[in-house]
Every structure is written in structure tokens, then in C-alpha cells.
Amino acid sequence: MLCPSSNPGSACRLLVTLLYGLESYMDATEDSRFLQDLLMGNTLHVLIKLHDRLQRFAAQRPAPFQDSAEGLAQEVTEELRTLEATPESVELLHVLSKPHFQDLLSVHDAVALKDYAPKLPPLQPLPATEDEDVEDSVRIIRLVKSKEPLGATIKKELSGGIVVARIMRGGAADRSGLIHEGDKLSEVNGVPVENKRPEEIVPILAKSEGAVTFKVIPGTNKELEAEDTKIFVRTFFDYNPKEDPAIPCKDAGLEFRRGDVLQIVSQEDDTWWQARRHGDANLRAGLIPSRQLQERRVALQRPEALFHAARVPKSSADEEEEDTDYGAISGIHIAGLRRSFRLSRKDHKPNEIQTRWRKSESVGARNIPSYQEVAPYNRKQGDPYRLVLLVGPAGVGVSELKRKLLLSDPEHFSVPVPYTSREHRRLEREGVEYYFVSRRNFERDILNCKFLEYGEHEGNYYGTSVDSVRRVLAESKVCLLDVEPHVIKTLYTAEFKPYVVFVKPPAIEQLRLSRRRAKVLSSHREPTPLRMFSDADFEDMINTAQAMENKYGCLFEKIIINDDLALAFTEIRAELARLEKETNWIPKTWAQT
């Protein structure tokens, strides 16, 4: 097979030279005729031309639109199999399953990743003589060097020897099957490495062209199992290995963003796991901090927000109309087309039962996780939709986004009907405006923890119950719920499978611009019920959002910055549509129930 060359056209010239050089050795034997037919054959010439064109393509450094067409086709195939069969979906499945189409996508991804160098058969180590001990023999290993890293890290022992610390799954070293963890490096390209520092060996590898030769003494460590694990995790923090001073090799690290789904392929090292990003066409694993390491780091930082994250009361949202029932109810949100129960921070006085709930869950909130084990989820026809929870500081526009979603498709989206202990008024319908119950029954339900949130105003109770949420889901509608963050954990169960959207404010400069005509609810001590937003309100909104994210960020699956209400609505509407049609990830414990 031809080795890759940086000089386009060199393969053709090499073939011509080979033909001229062999001309004097050709005779009438069968082997000579076979070799001549092979070298003069049209297939070989086409492959050589294709090779040269690929080299010119690589020299142009084009940027592919995407490099995971094959993985995308697999996801589409899985999605189509979960949907109701139609002539169009059946035809598309038939096209995607054709070998020629799959090969075309595979070639596309290989070219996009510039992974079209010839795959040479792995070179076997030199056989040991009969009188040599296999474990103590010296092996000579030669690996063809390509553009990808070798996929191994090294470390220096106390004795001064350089040993292979870990083999990255899916990398060149792993695929070769010749280098294993614990192997001791004696020479690299003929240069002795005994007593050298690991950073002194990197330039030796960099100067290598074409191939790298290692002289190794086999270690006693067991080889890694070739089979990948099926552990998937969602990340709760951003990670850049280039900025991590503790990582053994920055080039071996895997960069990811908060919310990415990773497949963990090795947890043998308690400090550094090996993982690959789900859906990534590159199968080479990278190093990421283990759960123990990352959570120990967070604990040592001891950020103030993690250990003193008290509940930050909400101020008014930006609704213009107000119902008399909703004026000053402590700590309650009732979803609907009217305004939610939101107070000025000056008026808020949490009741005793709500305070006990927050104290009991605050200990768990301090333990901020780094990863969450997840499983793929596709909603089956007839199953309830996932509950959608909208969370955000007062004034950020949560209620407006919920209102726009309801108005955009009232047959698809709905909200739970609130409960109240006040008297039934004329024209009000049971189960439409409210569910009317007696004060005694309301207080009994409070003690039985049937309310997600509740409050009291002018001697009457108002609240949102878990049963009212279940009623909406039973109607095969998407239930929208605007809640305080501490309520999320009550609903964070396999029954509701909540999808939590955190609505975040933009920078204060943009808040001044976008809220210049908006009004906020005044406290009871101020002369007017509504007033214009102030810089203090904006700062309180930003600080509250940061406190919410610090304490409950591990529960947020989607973060939307409400810089512009119309754009934020378009983003959340598209996200909810995607959630219903595509595969999404839920905690693994939900999938097991």
C-alpha cells in the first residue's frame, strides 16, 4: 500500500519509476505477467489519482460543514423507528439502510476528518528467542505516524525509568495493540530515554517523520478490555484541558461545555477518566477529571454561593394587569394567563412550612455534582409529555414567555388550575379559574405536602397542587409551570421527567435598554402599586439569577438569556419542539423505573 506523501503527484511518479525499473526483470513467467497486469491495471491508476487529489485537498485546508454525517444518519434511523410508519419514513429508512449510501457517508466523514491515510497492518514485535523470558524481553515496536496523536501518556518512575501511564481508548496506540500500560520505554527512535524527563521526550516524537520506533520492556499490567462501557453522563461544568495545570497531558484532554453528553470509556484511574463526546465521529477518547477529583476541587474552592445560598425573594414581573386576588400573596406562583404570585422583596415573609422544606433540602443543594449519569429517552406515543418548568428571577420575563407559549398553541400547552379556600364568585367555574376547597381541607392538604407552592392573602389560601399538574399531563398536553427553584426537587422524579428551563437576564446595560418602559410591583409601603425599574432592581435580578444558578444549576437543562423577548420565545419554542421529536437524555434512575 502507498504511504501518504505531502507532495501531490509523487505517487504517480513513483509508479512510473517502478515500472521502468522493473522492465528489465520482466519475463514470461506467470508471476511477472501478474505483476505487470497489476501495475498497469486501471484500478490501481484510479486509486493513485484519487490519492493525489486527496493530498491536494488536504493541502488546501478546507473546513468541512460537518464531520459526523454517518452518526447523524444513525440518529435519524433510530428516530424514524420510534415514529409511526408512513410511506415517506419507510422510504427514507430504506435509503439510509443501503450499504452504498452508508459507505458514501463513511467516506464523507473520513475526508472531512482527513482520515484517509492508508491503514497499514500493525507491525508485530520481534519474536523472542527460546532462552529469553517473555516478560523480560525487549520488544521493538514501529508505529506509522499520522496527523493524530499516538494516544498515550507517559510518566517518570522514582527509579528514573519512563513508563506508559495510560493508553487512550480509540487512539493510534490502542488500535495497534502493541503498547500497553506499564510498558517501560527504553529508546524512542534510537534515542535512550532512561532518566529523561517526559517533556524532553516530546520533541523526539515531534521530529519523527513517517514512523516512530519504540524499544520497550513489557510491563506486568493487565491490558485494557477492548469493549467500551455504555456509561453516559451529562456535564455540569465547562472544562478546558489547556487551562488545567493538573492534567497529565494537555493534548490528551477532552474539552467540553456544560450540558454536553459524554460516554465514559474508562474509569480505571481514580483521578482521570477517559471519555468521548457522544455523537463525535472521532473515536479517540480524551482525559477528563473524575467525579472525585472535580467535586474535591469544588469543595476546596468553597465558593460563598454554595454554602450561604439563602433564598432570594422575587420582586415583581413585568405584567401590566393585576387581579385583586394576586396583590400580595407570600411566596406563591399560580400559573395562568393572569399574573403569577410574586412579591416585592421588601414584602416577602415566608411561612413556617415553606421554611422547613427549604431547610431540609438546602443540605443536598450544597453538594454540587460534576456529572450526572443519563440514558437516552424517546417519548412513546400515548405517554405523557415531559413537564416543563420555567425558572428565573423576578422581572426577567418568565411569565411573559409562559404566556406567549400558551397563546401560541392553547391546544398543546396548558397550565395547572390553582386551588383556593375563598368563596366561589359569580361566573367562576369550578376547575377552570380555580378549584374551590374549604379552609380546613386546604390546611389538611398543606400538612400532607400536596401543594408545590401556596400562600395566604386576606385570610384566604391559594396554591398549586401536584394533582393539578397530573391532570394536565393526563390530557396529553405539555404542562407549563412557573416555579421557585426549590420546588424543582419535589417534581424531579421519573413520573414527571421535568425539563427545566432557566431564564437568565442579560448584562445590566441591556436590561436598562430592554426594560426602560417596564414596571415592577411596589412594596405595600410605597404610594403606587407599580413603579419603573431601577438599577437596584436590575442588580438584584442579576444577583438572584447568579445565586439560583450556583445552587440549582445542576438541575437546569436549558439556559435562555432573555435579551429580547421575541428571540427568547422563538428559542424556547424551538427547543420544546425538538424535545418532543428527538432523542433527549434523562437521569438514568428515571429510565430504570
Image: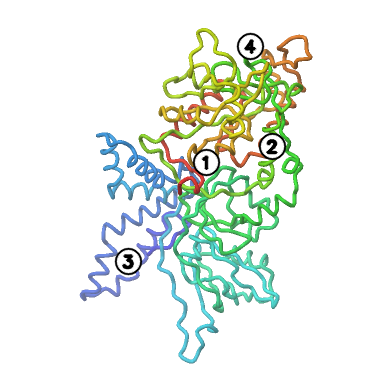
Which comes before the other along the chain, label 3 or label 4?
Answer: 3
Find the distance from the CA under tag 1 to the CA under tag 3. 72 Å
The 10 Å Cα crowd at callout 3, few under 14, some 14 to 19, many 20 or more, is: some
201 shown above or below 410: below
Q: Which mark is residue 324?
A: 4
**Front position in the image: 136 or 326:** 326
Q: 6 above or below 342?
A: below
Residue type beneath disc 3: Leu
For marks 4 and 1, give the CA distance. 35 Å
Crowd rating for badge 4 (residues with CA inside 10 Å; few <14, some 14–19, many 20+) = few
Quadrant in the rendering for residue 524: top right
Q: Which residue is mark 3?
A: 19
Q: Quadrant of residue 291?
A: bottom right
Does label 4 or label 1 sit earlier along the sequence? 4
Numbered mark located on residue 356 in the image? 2
Q: Secondary structure at mark 2?
A: helix
Q: Position of residue 381 (x, y in %)?
A: 35, 35
Q: Which residue is mark 1?
A: 493
